[in-house]
Amino acid sequence: MPLPGGGGAAAAARLPASGEAAAAAREEEQEEEGEEDLRDGGVPFFVNRGGLPVDEPTWERMWRHVARIHPDGERVAERIRGAADLPKIPIPSVPAFQPSTPIPERLEAVQRYIRELQYNHTGTQFFEIKKSRPLTGLMDLAKEMTKEALPIKCLEAVILGIYLTNNMTTLDRFPISFKTHFSGNYFRHIVLGVNFGGRYGALGISRREELMYKAPVFRTLSELIFDFEEAYRRCWHTLKKVKLGHCVSHDPHSVEQIEWKHSILDLDKLSREDFRKELERHARDMRLKIGKGTGPPSPTKDRKKDVSSPQRGQASPHRRNSRGDRRPSGEKKPADSKAMPDLNGYQIRV
């Protein structure tokens, strides 16, 4: 499959200026198509495209990949596959709430459920997430996730978080994507941003505890993003880019697509203050969109308003925003003079 670990970054470093620009353009094009979800810090991973139960070729490919990436190599695969009496894995219960349960407590329960599914370390993502699918199709996939109760990666956790919070109509949900750099490799991660009562937080899953759940206690969107940035800094990662989507509809039958990248903020082109201003501008855009009635509608209101399938037109939700419609990043900030400590090439994967 795909790319050798870290080779792309090393090769780009040896390219002339024109080559660097071409490499950056290719990388941006890959990100536009969602290919970043197939790379994990320079280490490629597979996606199970055959559905469940997993077919034999996908199953064997997964174990070969495990043997390549695990420190114990083939021995770990042989030990697990050859075991006659493996312990039974408990299946987490999908959280159910009383109408009186406060939203913050519901969010904690949803995050607890996502955590109990556990992070998928196999190198094969079990559920294929196509970002261009309408919301109703992604919600069907999330329902299947709850039935199978398999380990998940961060993009699956975002879809599951949307599904499990659909009945919390006073909660705004929007995707937040991060691109970071460490030791010659780029790393990508995504969480589900939430806003309740004017306070921001996040749901998700990660190898790192500080890069997933954030209780809705942050007064502004910039405070939430800066908290993630500080968490990355503690892992010796440099935040390079943040992508913010718009609020997701609460209607599980909506044929709209999730808007994943309404604002794309490149930190190499933004001063600290401009970065904060762009984050707050995006927060205002979301509030205005909801205030004008174009944000996430309640299921009842939406179904009463239009019971037929929408026609594709100028304002069709199926059409992806062009790159020119997105928020510009601003001017380039001065380079950081702090030197990165030499960790002998050790990859801290988050």
Image: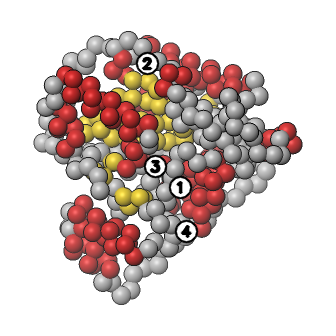
| Mark with earlier residue (4, 1) | 1
Specify the quadrant that holds the N terminus.
bottom left
The label on residue 114 is: 1
Q: Secondary structure at mark 4?
A: helix
| Mark with earlier residue (1, 2) | 1
Given this view, does label 1 or label 2 mark the residue nearer the observer?
2
Separation of marks 4 and 1 at Cα, in angstroms: 13 Å
Q: Secondary structure at mark 1?
A: helix
Q: What residue do we see at 33% from left, 84% from top?
A: 83
Percent across and percent down for residue 154 are 46, 49
Separation of marks 4 and 2 at Cα, in angstroms: 41 Å
240 or 18, which is in the foreground?
A: 18
Residue at which label 4 appears: 148
The label on residue 329 is: 2
| Mark with earlier residue (3, 1) | 1
Q: Is residue 176 left or right of residue 2?
A: right
Given this view, does label 2 or label 3 mark the residue nearer the observer?
2
Q: What residue do we see at 62% from left, 22% from top?
A: 285
Separation of marks 3 and 1 at Cα, in angstroms: 10 Å
Which amino acid lies under the numbered mark 3 shown in the image of this protein?
Cys
Q: Are marks 2 and 3 in contact (CB under 8 Å)?
A: no
| Mark with earlier residue (4, 2) | 4
Q: Is residue 290 left or right of residue 284?
A: right
Residue at which label 3 appears: 154
Q: Are marks 4 and 3 in contact (CB under 8 Å)?
A: no
